[in-house]
Amino acid sequence: EEVEEMKRISEAMCIPCRDGGLCEEFDGYFKLEDKVIDDSGNLRPVKLNQLGLSNVEATQLVKQADVVLAQLMLRVVGYKYPGDLAKNYDYYIKRVTHESSLSMPIYAAVAALIGRWQDALTLFRESLKVDLENLYGNTQDGFHVATAGGLWWAVLHGFLGIRLEDGKIVIPDSAAESVIKVLKYSSLRAQKS
């Protein structure tokens, strides 16, 4: 019943995409000044007010790319999402500040799905530090539940690739290989520390 409701909602959503598969964050987004945080991709939180921009609202910088999140969510519930997930990841990772505590784990999930393992593991590790190292400077105000939930999404739907198809849970054959990659990477990092 809940899955059917999600499908109904997802079918009513409009994600405007260009012919090449790049989707607009919101109507008029591509008309804004094109600014990037890092040409190679931003894998850590950056505060918008630290960027020295007088009118950040006039730029394409975002706290989290809802297009990327929407594409991931639609994929998980078995809906054919518009646009190209890898193209949108590549575009928005350069323009996202990750000021939303949900952003990094969602990007970790998407990076894993599209085979960007180094990005996925880096974003996952940074997400684990949100409260442990007080990355947002506000852990004293409470636990970042969105990050914790996003980390579960990264594991289940990113690294393992679990999704729904026709109301059934699908676990890809590559899930076991993905677990081995994550464990191998984790043990290598532990040995270097």
Image (cartoon, rainbow, N blue to C red):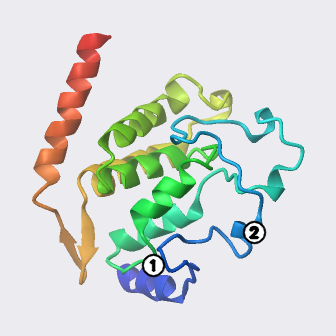
9 versus 143 height, above or below? below
Quadrant in which residue 192 is drawn: top left
Q: Earlier in the sequence, mark 2 or mark 1?
A: 2
Check disc 1 and report its element: helix, strand or loop.
loop
Front-most of residues 127 and 43: 43
Q: Residue furthest right?
A: 54
Front-most of residues 39 and 123: 39
Q: Nearer the viewer, mark 2 or mark 1?
A: 2
Q: Amino acid at mark 2?
A: Lys
Which residue corresponds to the image point at 48% horizontal and 28% vertical from the top-left? 129
Mark 2 residue crowding within 10 angstroms, few (<14) / some (14–19) / many (20+): few
Q: Amino acid at mark 1?
A: Pro
Which residue corresponds to the image point at 38% horizontal and 86% vertical from the top-left? 4
Residue 150 x %, y %: 45, 50
State the separation of the CA atoms marked 2 and 1. 20 Å
Identify the residue position indicated by label 1 in the image: 82
34 versus 16 height, above or below? above
Residue 68 x %, y %: 50, 62
Question: Does 129 sit left or right of 177 as displayed?
Answer: right
24 versus 39 height, above or below? below
Question: Does 10 sit left or right of 30 as displayed?
Answer: left
Question: Does 160 sit left or right of 71 as displayed?
Answer: left
Check disc 2 and report its element: helix, strand or loop.
helix
Front-most of residues 93 and 5: 93
Residue 80 x %, y %: 36, 80
Quadrant showing the N terminus: bottom left
Which residue corresponds to the image point at 70% horizontal and 52% vertical from the top-left? 61
Mark 1 residue crowding within 10 angstroms, few (<14) / some (14–19) / many (20+): some
Identify the residue position indicated by label 2 in the image: 31
Residue 65 x %, y %: 58, 58
Quadrant showing the C terminus: top left
